[in-house]
Image: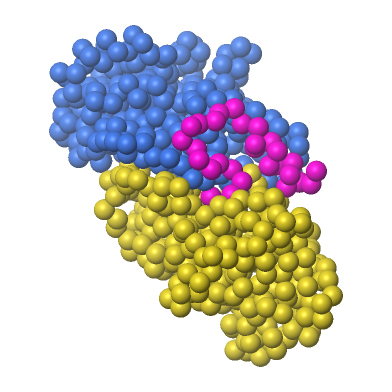
Chain colours: A blue, B yellow
Amino acid sequence: MNEFELIRDYFARQPVTRADVVVGIGDDAAVLELPVDRQLVVSTDMLVAGVHFPQETAPAAVGYKALAVNLSDLAAMGASPAWFTLNLSLPAADPVWLRAFCAGLFDLAGAFGLQLVGGDTTRGPLTIGIQIAGFVPHGQALLRSGARPGDGIYVTGWLGDAALGLMCLREQLRLPESDRAQVLQRLERPTPRVHEGEALRGLASACIDISDGLVADLGHVLEASGVGAQVELATLPLSAVYQAVRGQVGWNPAVARGDDYELCFTVPAQRQPALEALAAQFDCAIRRIGVIEARPGLRLVEPSGAAFRPDIPGFDHFRGP
Amino acid sequence: MNEFELIRDYFARQPVTRADVVVGIGDDAAVLELPVDRQLVVSTDMLVAGVHFPQETAPAAVGYKALAVNLSDLAAMGASPAWFTLNLSLPAADPVWLRAFCAGLFDLAGAFGLQLVGGDTTRGPLTIGIQIAGFVPHGQALLRSGARPGDGIYVTGWLGDAALGLMCLREQLRLPESDRAQVLQRLERPTPRVHEGEALRGLASACIDISDGLVADLGHVLEASGVGAQVELATLPLSAVYQAVRGQVGWNPAVARGDDYELCFTVPAQRQPALEALAAQFDCAIRRIGVIEARPGLRLVEPSGAAFRPDIPGFDHFRGP
C-alpha cells in the first residue's frame, strides 16, 4: 500500500453515511442532494501548526479542534451541520499521526452526523483547512446584524478557561493537575454549541461564536448591528478553576483572549421567558451578561462600578476575508 | 488601516455578485439560496508553495491557478460553477503580493460568474486552499465510473505543453522565446474546460480532468469503470511547439506528466455524431485518442505499432482522500 492508498484508506473509514450524499470521496467532486425550503450555510477555517496550535499538539486534538472551530461557525448561524471537506498539508504521511488525527476528527464528525465528502492531501507544512456546510430553514439564519437596544446579551458555557489552558502551556500559570487538565481540555477540545445554536433560531436577534475573545467578537455584533453594549463583569460565567485564580489572572482571560468557542447572542426582552424555558434543555448553562444600548461602544463594568479597559494583545495572526 | 482591514478590503472588491448569495463575506458563515431540481457539486484543492508551484511564481499566476484547478474539477463533473471559499496562509500581509494574487483570482472568477462567499486568512507558509461549489441537473453529473467497452476516448485541447513549461523552468528544455512563453502560459494559466464539461452532460459516459497526466487520470476512469483501454499515441493532440521538440522529449510529457487540466472523457458510439456536431461550438479542439476495451489495463500504442511504456515519475506530493 503506497502513501496515497494509505491516506485514502484512513479517510474512507469515517463513521457517518448520509442519504443525501450521492457521490462522496473518490470522484473529481462530490454530488450532493439538496433539501427543499432550506438555505445552505457555508464556512471555512484554517489551522496552521505553530500559529493556531503548538507544533507538538497531540494529533487527535488537532483533528478534533480543526473540525470544532468550523462547527462553531455553523452553530453561530443556527445551522444544522451536514457535510465537510478537508485540505490537509502534512510534512510526512506518518500512519501513527494520521490514525490519531482521524480519530479526533471523526469522533466529532460522528457526534454531529457530519460526513466528509471530499478533500486534498499534500506534502507540506502542517496545515488543516476545513470547509463545512449545513442548513437553516429559509430566512432563519442567526446573523451578527440583528441586535437592537434593550436586547439582553447572553453567553453559553464558560469564558476564559481556554485562555488559562494556553497560559499553562506557556508556563505563565501553574494550576493543580486536575484544574490544569480541565482548562487544557477546554483549549484542545472545545464543545461546539451546535444544538444550542439550532435552538436559538427564531429566538436570538444576533449571534456570534467567541473565537477571538468576548470583546472582539461581541464587538463584531455591535459594529454589524450599529449599536453599543454594557457588560457587567460580575455576571461573567467563570468556572470554579477560573474563580480560584481570578485574583491572579484578572478579567482579561475571560474577555480579551480567544479559543472559548462559546456562543454570544442577543435576545429581545419579549423573548427572554421563552429563552429561559428553553435553556433548561441545553447541555450547558446560559448566562445573561449585559444589555445592548443605542450608544456605540462596548462598556465593561467592574463589580465596583468602575470601567474596565481590557488588554487586547495584537492579533498574532491576521484574519479575513 | 490594519492588516486585517487591508486583507478584507482586497477580497471585498470582487467582480461577481450573485442573486443567490443572501449573506456573503463578513458573518460567521455565508447563507446561500438553493436552486430547485439541481444537485450540488463540491470539490476542494490545496496548493502549497514549493510543492505545487515554485516559491517565486508571480502572485497573479498563483491566484489564477489555485482557482483554475478547482474549476477544472467542476468541469470534469459537468457542473456549472457558483460559489467558492478561500483559505489563505501567507508569510506576510504584503499589499503588492495580495493585490496581484486577487487580480489573478478574480480575473478567472469573473470569467465564470463565480462569487467568493467566505474564507480565512492567516499567517503561515504560503498555502492556498479553495473549495468550490456548482450545480448539475438531477442525475446528470459526469462520473468516472460510466465508461463501457466500445466507447471512444477523447481529450480537449492540447496535451503536454504544461509539462514542457515545467521543463523550461527547471532548465531541462530550451525553447525559442515565444514557444517558451506559450508553454509557460499553459503551465501557469490553464483554461478550465467548464463550458465543454457542461456541454458533455448527457453525452459523455465518463469524464475526468487531467491533473496528474493522461496515464494516471485515464487510469482512474478505467479503474472506476472496471474496463481497459487502447490509446494511439499518433492521435494525441500535440501543439506545434510540442511537435517541434517531440524527437527530443518523446511522448512522456504528453502522457505521463500533469498540469494540463484538459478533460478526458468517453462517449458511446451512438452519441459520437452528436459530439461531433457539438464540438464545433467548443472553445478548444476535441480529439479522439482511443477506445475503451473490456480487457483491463491501459495500452499505449506507438505509431510503429509497438507498445509504449510511460515513464511515470514518483508522485512528489501525495493526494487524497
**Does residue A133 appear to the left or right of B51 in the view shown?**
left
Q: In this image, B144 relative to A91: left or right?
A: left
Q: Is residue A146 visible?
A: yes
Is residue B253 found left or right of B133 in the rendered image?
A: right
In the picture, residue A253 is in which quadrant?
top left
Q: Nearer the viewer, residue A230 or B268?
A: B268
Q: Nearer the viewer, residue A28 or A290?
A: A28
Residue B93 is a magenta residue: no
Q: Is residue B8 above or below residue B259?
A: above
Q: Residue at x 55, y 25 (%)?
A: A110
Q: Residue at x 73, y 75 (%)?
A: B233
Which residue is more in the foreground, A223 or A75? A75
| Horizontal and vertical percent position of residue A70 | 47, 36
* The stretch drawn in magenta includes residue A10: yes
Along the horizontal axis of the image, is B235 left or right of B269?
Answer: right
Q: Nearer the viewer, residue A24 or B47?
A: A24
Residue occupying image coordinates x 49% and y 62%: B203
* x 29%, y 36%: residue: A37
- How many marks can you see? 0
Question: Where is the N terminus of chain B found, in terms of image quarters?
Answer: bottom left
Q: Can I make out residue A165 in this image?
A: no
Give coordinates of residue A263: x percent, y percent. Answer: 37, 26
In the rendered image, which quarter is residue A279 located in? Answer: top left
Please, is residue B217 above or below residue B260 in the view? above
Q: Which residues are magenta?
A: A1-29
Residue B252: % across, % down: 76, 72
Tell me residue A46's x, y (percent).
52, 44
Q: Residue furthest front?
A: B270
